[in-house]
Image (cartoon, rainbow, N blue to C red):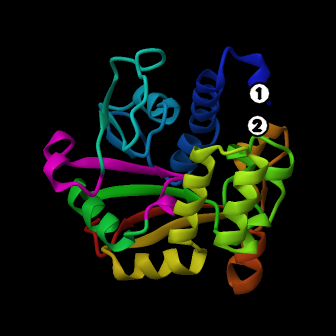
Amino acid sequence: MIRPSDFNDWQEYYWTYQYILAKRYLIPMLEKQGISIAGKNVFEIGCGSGGVIEAFAESAERAVGLDVAPFDYTRFGSERVEYLTADIFDDRQREKYEGAYDVILLRDVIEHLPRKDELFSVCDALLNPRGIMLVTFPPFYSPFGAHQQVHARTTAGRAPYLHLLGRGLYTAYLRWVEKGNKEIVKSARELFDTKTTIRSLRRAIVRSAFEIQHQEYYLIRPSYEIRYGLRPRKVQFLQWIPVLRELCVMGVYMILRKKNRKP
């Protein structure tokens, strides 16, 4: 378990958390499914400060991290990773990162992106025929589907299920308890506009060029062990119970591959 108080600032803490998550959980999950990172081309959409893609870059042939928000990569970024500030939906910037990738990472970012069909189309174009996608996200109706455990600065703002009050009441509540923190309110509005549930994402996958190769459902997410000292707990059986899975599954991990790919 790591604590923000152990670091100089939030960026250092969050980068370290991302790095540990990738090394301890994300890369081993892929390896257990027979997917090696060694010598591969890896592209992360929504890389944030870069901890995850840096961990993958230690074995990858090429590593690219993209985020729509500008970050200072001079502190923790290495020469192994090419960082880009761009919108994945902006065709005018696509030449910056075009290529045949083996792995695309979407770690806790797909719930912020409303245009799922377009997103999968872009990923289809970027991946080589045998490429895979690793997608993780918290379902919208789960206890912390608005990311309040991360973004909220006050204890009251981190309460589970508060976002089920509805968009208007919840954002008004956030403005009150967070004393005008615009970043938190903006993030919450994005999540409400998208409302990414397990059901809605599955439907988008069915419409896409991809299919689910492997999936894991967590009552306690792996990230919670790093940040809060709670041991991860899977609840695979809940994937068959529609209402309970949306309300109780706090994290979904999926590996997607292209449909009808050649062996």
Residue 2: give its label: 1
The structure residue drawn at horizontal position 69% and vertical position 74%, both measured from the top left corner, is: 166
Q: Is residue 104 above or below residue 97?
A: below
Residue 207 at what x, y percent from top left?
36, 82
Residue occupied by mark 2: 227
Residue 78 at what x, y percent from top left?
39, 18
Q: Is residue 212 above or below residue 133?
A: below
- Closer to the chain start, of discs 1 and 2, is 1
Q: Residues within 10 Å of mark 2 (few under 14, many from 20)?
A: some
What segment is highlighted magenta in the picture? 88-113
Q: Which quadrant does the N terminus fall into?
A: top right
**Front-most of 70 and 48?**
70
**Front-most of 19 and 93?**
93
Residue 133 at what x, y percent from top left?
41, 57
Query: How many numbered marks are there?
Result: 2
Instruction: Look at the numbered discs 1 and 2 and tell me whether their residues touch, using CB distance below 8 Å.
Output: yes
Q: Which element carries disc 1, helix, strand or loop?
A: loop
Q: Amino acid at mark 1?
A: Ile
> Toward which corner of the image does residue 81 lie, by quadrant?
top left
The structure residue drawn at horizontal position 70% and vertical position 62%, both measured from the top left corner, is: 172
Q: Which quadrant does the C terminus fall into?
A: bottom left
Image position of 206 (left or right of 192): left
Q: CA distance from mark 1 to mark 2?
A: 6 Å
Decide whether residue 170 is among the magenta residues: no
Q: Which element carries disc 2, helix, strand or loop?
A: helix
